Every structure is written in structure tokens, then in C-alpha cells.
Amino acid sequence: KAGVTQTPRYLIKTRGQQVTLSCSPISGHRSVSWYQQTPGQGLQFLFEYFSETQRNKGNFPGRFSGRQFSNSRSEMNVSTLELGDSALYLCASRAGPPYEQYFGPGTRLTVT
Amino acid sequence: AQRVTQPEKLLSVFKGAPVELKCNYSYSGSPELFWYVQYSRQRLQLLLRHISRESIKGFTADLNKGETSFHLKKPFAQEEDSAMYYCALSPGLSSNTGKLIFGQGTTLQVKP
């Protein structure tokens, strides 16, 4: 089975711009979760989508949003980028039982 | 507050020595606990989960609800165990939520 894929792998944006990141889950997985990883805050949960509905949400401002399509692919969008949004963004998909999360390689976002 | 604490950023041991990676959590209910591992240039992956009570690659972890701890142990470290280890908590049944709360991670360095 192909693993979780994320595109693009690297991205450089300017403050104030917006960005869209994409995540393709493992075939058959309907749950996709997003995480932000930074040296200071570590891995923080952004949100989870299941069958095109947001099921859980972390403590991030409304500038961070996401969606899921009928084929379970998911996108996350960050509007009005700030320098502090520079991070590695990971997505994970799962199905179950046993509901193990499979992580993608991440998208490295740099905001200048 | 829901929190996972890994007190050591770096743990350095010699090959063949015992290893204990510490994890303490704060959660009012009955969490599910996990250890994730990230080897160099690889994706974050599940190592073990407390409900399965199994040993993976010689590692075990016991949930101590009284001490709210979930320490990861291995009796004899191998060089290939060198990696970043994350303790994580699921605030609810993993069948219902993909949300994970991660600790800051501990780098395990096994010296020859």
C-alpha cells in the first residue's frame, strides 16, 4: 500500500500571503489529522477530518482551516501568514481497528 | 489540563545498557497512551500502545495510573535504537478521535 503523501514538500511564502497544503491518505483511510511541528512548541494538533466533516479541532486561530474531499484527500489552508507559522506540517491518516495513525513526510513551510 | 511531559531532551547510553525514556501525563479521564518513534530521515511511526501490552523491538511500556506515567524501557540498547521518541496521549478512545497530544520528545543516542 502506498503511504500518506503530502504536497508540496517545501514551500516559501511571504508574510500576509496564504497557503494551501495537500494530504493524500492511505487508500481506504477516511480519517485525516493535521499537526504543526515547531522547535519551540513541538507537535501540536490542528484538526481532524472524517468523511468530509471536521471532527476535532485544536487551539489554533481561525486563519488555519481545512477541508476533506469525497476521496478522503484533505487540504489545509493558512491565511494571512505570519512568521510564526513557519513549521513542518504533518498529516496522518488512519482506519481501524486498530486506528493506528500513519504519518506523511510533512510539508516544510517557511514564511519570510 | 491535558499534557504530556518528557523531562529529558536527550538520553545518551552505551550499547547494551538499559534504557528508560520517561513520560508523565496529565489527564482527568482514562487516556490511551502511545510511543511514537522517528528514525533519521524517516517518518514518524507508531512504536507501541498501552492497550496492546506488547513488546516491539524489545521495548515495553507500562501504564502506571497512580503515578500518571508511561515510561518506555528496553533492557539492552542497540545502536539502531538511536532516534527521537515521542510519548503521546489520545484524549478519549482512539476509535473516536484522531487527536493526539504529544510530549516534546526525547532523543535517544546509543553509543557503540
Image (tube, coloured by chain):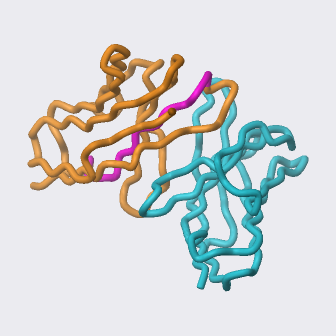
- Outermost residue, front side: B1
* Left or right, B96 with reference to B85: right
Would you place residue A99 above or below residue A44 in this image? Answer: above
- What residue appears at the point 67 percent right and 62 percent down from the top-left corner? A6
Magenta residues, start to end? B81-93
In the picture, which quadrant includes the C terminus of chain A?
bottom right
Q: Is residue A82 visible?
A: yes
Residue placed most toward the observer, B50 or B105:
B105
**Residue B54 placed where, x, y %?**
38, 21
- Outermost residue, top side: B66
- What residue appears at the point 75 percent right and 45 percent down from the top-left corner? A27
**Chain B color in figure:** orange
- What residue appears at the point 64 percent right and 75 percent down from the top-left corner? A82
- Outermost residue, right side: A70
Q: Is residue A2 visible?
A: no
Residue placed most toward the observer, A57 or B34:
A57
Residue A27 sits inside the magenta stretch: no
**Residue A60 placed where, x, y %?**
66, 54
Residue placed most toward the observer, A78 or A69:
A78
**Chain A color in figure:** cyan
- What residue appears at the point 51 percent right and 24 percent down from the top-left corner? B32
Would you place residue A17 above or below residue B58 in this image? Answer: below
Residue placed most toward the observer, A104 or B6:
B6
**Residue B74 placed where, x, y %?**
22, 32
Quadrant of res B40: bottom left
Magenta segment, principal secondary structure?
strand
Quadrant of res B76: top left
